Image (cartoon, rainbow, N blue to C red):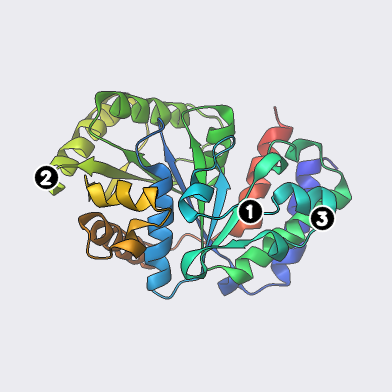
Amino acid sequence: MDQAERLRNIIKVNSQMSRPESTARVIAVTSGKGGVGKSNTAINLAVQFKKMGKNVIIFDADFGLANIEVMFGAMPKYTLADVIYEGKDIKEIITWGPMEIGFVSGGSGISRLSGLSGNQINCLVQNLVQLDFIADIIIVDTGAGIADSVLEFLVASGEIILVTTPEPTSITDAYSMLKALDTHPRFHKQQSKIKVLSNKVLDEEDGIQLFSKLNMVVQKYLNISIEFLGTVPQDDQVSRAVMQQNPVSIKNPAAKASKAYEQIAFKLTDMEEGQTQKRRGMAGFFSSIMAGRRKL
């Protein structure tokens, strides 16, 4: 029995011990390039979900960058590697930010997943299952670009938010990411939803036009579907909030960007209510990642 199969069996046992309603909704937030507002989107959506009464955890999978940490104004003491190799409980590595939004740093633990022993796999999954009881929604902030380390998180996710801006390079890079997913052997097109968020636009019409440009090329050249999630306008209040290490949705709830994030959070909630797809939870999410690594 290989590592991926052992992991699936462990997850199956743990899943039987938990209630279906305890499984968290996992949303991956990504972008084709850096600097388009990916991490800002992840944090502000977390704030808006929290305002709606949801328990939220942000999982930082953007290796090498500490955007979430900087924007939260909090440095995590532990990472996922401490759960795997130091015996820490998952609850011990959660850093609690504003409004009791949880934050988990993947750290070096992610890059070393493929070499885990059976006992380490069991420990990891038992801890990941706990997140499904702690959180209603887990937002995974991936790296930017089409590196394998980014794509494996997107392939494992059933729900993807792709953030782009009107800049030509941003649109081109967003298309490159969609193309990489379209040709990825493990990407399940029928089971995955890709939602495009037009960020830093002049107005809603500008955001719709941005999506239309991208969607036209996607429909012509790719065998993949995308849907329009919404727009976030260019707003100086966002950068001011970042400078103060405070999400704009908290610092200035009346800001244009804050209102836009609020609308998008409500739309995401409405979208899920109309779906019949079963949540996989965080343990199932990592199971897919590890299974893929074993096949490399």
155 or 109: nearer the eye? 109
Residue 294's place in the image compared with 45, above or below, is above
Residue at label 1?
A: 76
Residue at label 3?
A: 122
- Type of amino acid under label 2: Glu
Q: Could you say where residue 218 lies in the image, as x and y percent from the top left? A: 30, 30
Residue at label 2?
A: 205
Q: Secondary structure at mark 3?
A: helix
- The mark closer to the camera, 2 or 1, is 1
Determine whether label 1 and label 3 are within 8 Å by CB: no
Q: Secondary structure at mark 2?
A: helix
On-image quarter of the N terminus: top right
> How would you rate the neighbour count of disc 2 (Cα within 10 Å): few for under 14, some for 14-19, many for 20 or more?
few
Earlier-in-chain disc, 2 versus 1: 1
The CA distance from mark 1 to mark 3 is 24 Å
The CA distance from mark 2 to mark 3 is 50 Å
Residue 190's place in the image compared with 103, above or below, is above
The CA distance from mark 2 to mark 1 is 40 Å
Q: Is residue 186 visible?
A: no
Q: Could you say where residue 158 lies in the image, as x and y percent from the top left? A: 49, 50
Q: Which mark is residue 130?
A: none
Earlier-in-chain disc, 1 versus 3: 1
**Image check: 77 left or right of 250?**
right
- The mark closer to the camera, 2 or 3, is 2
On-image quarter of the C terminus: top right
Location of residue 164 (image quadrant): top left
Residue at image point 49% right, 55% down: 72
- Type of amino acid under label 1: Pro
Location of residue 168 (image quadrant): top left
> How would you rate the neighbour count of disc 3 (Cα within 10 Å): few for under 14, some for 14-19, many for 20 or more?
some
- Type of amino acid under label 3: Asn
